[in-house]
Amino acid sequence: EARTYILLKNAYFQTGDTTKAVEALKEGFNKYPGNENMIASLINHYLLNTDHPEDALDFIQTAKKQHPENAQYYSAEAQIYDKLDQNEKAKESYKAAIEREPDLFMALYNLGVLYFNEGVDIVSKANQTKDDAEYKKLRDQANEKFMQAIPYMERALEVKPDETNVLTTLKTLYYRLRTVDPKYVDKYKEVNAKLKELNEGSGQSNEKN
């Protein structure tokens, strides 16, 4: 059934025939629109292998109707909106994914990164202005974005306590906000110590190898 089309897609990809591979996926999807593996294969193809990830949105809408509680579809939808620089839609979809699966690491981390990057963009604008009042206004807006990023990053760290990307981002966030709230000074020290511990452990592991 659906698995046959996925195997056919894989075979075409192995021979380098991308066109027939995608045709096999679409044919399989049309015959078995409720099959989660088929849907996932289509979404992953458009996310990873094309310059037009938006082409996957119709398939995702169908998938969400078939499996409305599957958090992965909302997360995939968010990734597409993220790639298309549609931040508000991406946030909405990531939050929908987290509502359905609170421990979904990719959605937590990516949503935190979205807010973090928005803050960084505002900081860049602030650094370009020579007006003190405007600078302070933009600085406060950036700090607000950083504050919004923290809960998602902290939750992502709970899910994956040794994830260095999360620790590094939190280290930057806590450092930036250390003058806003003293609690971030201690939090900065905690994640910094954790990063050093992981780096030292990694170095010892490499020496043994």
Image: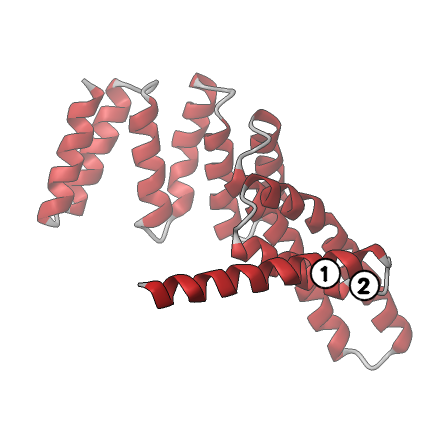
Is residue 135 positioned above or below 4 on the image? below
Mark 2 = which residue? 178
**Residue count near mark 2 (Cα–Cα under 10 Å), binned few <14, some 14–19, many ≥20:** some
* Residue type (three-letter) at the residue carrying disc 1: Tyr
Q: x, y (%) of residue 37?
A: 30, 27
Instruction: Give me the C-alpha separation between circle 2 and circle 1.
Output: 8 Å
Mark 1 = which residue? 188
Rendered image quadrant of residue 189: bottom right
Q: How many marks?
A: 2
Is 168 on the left or on the right of 18, as rendered? Answer: right
Front tag of 2 and 1: 1
Is 46 on the left or on the right of 150, as rendered? Answer: left
> Disc 2 or 1, which lies upstream in sequence?
2
Q: x, y (%) of residue 119?
A: 70, 60
Rendered image quadrant of residue 10: top left
Rendered image quadrant of residue 127: bottom right
Q: Is residue 117 visible?
A: no
Name the quadrant of the N terminus.
top left
Q: Is residue 168 visible?
A: yes
Relative depth, front residue between 196 and 136:
196
Residue at the location (22% across, 21% down)?
Answer: 2
Is 64 on the left or on the right of 147, as rendered? Answer: left
Is residue 23 positioned above or below 163 on the image? above
Name the quadrant of the C terminus.
bottom left
Q: Are marks 2 and 1 in contact (CB under 8 Å)?
A: yes
Is residue 15 positioned above or below 178 on the image? above
Residue at the location (53% across, 50% down)?
Answer: 162
Residue extending furthest toward the right: 133
Q: x, y (%) of residue 85?
A: 55, 53
Relative depth, front residue between 12 and 161:
161
* Residue type (three-letter) at the residue carrying disc 2: Arg
**Residue count near mark 1 (Cα–Cα under 10 Å), binned few <14, some 14–19, many ≥20:** many
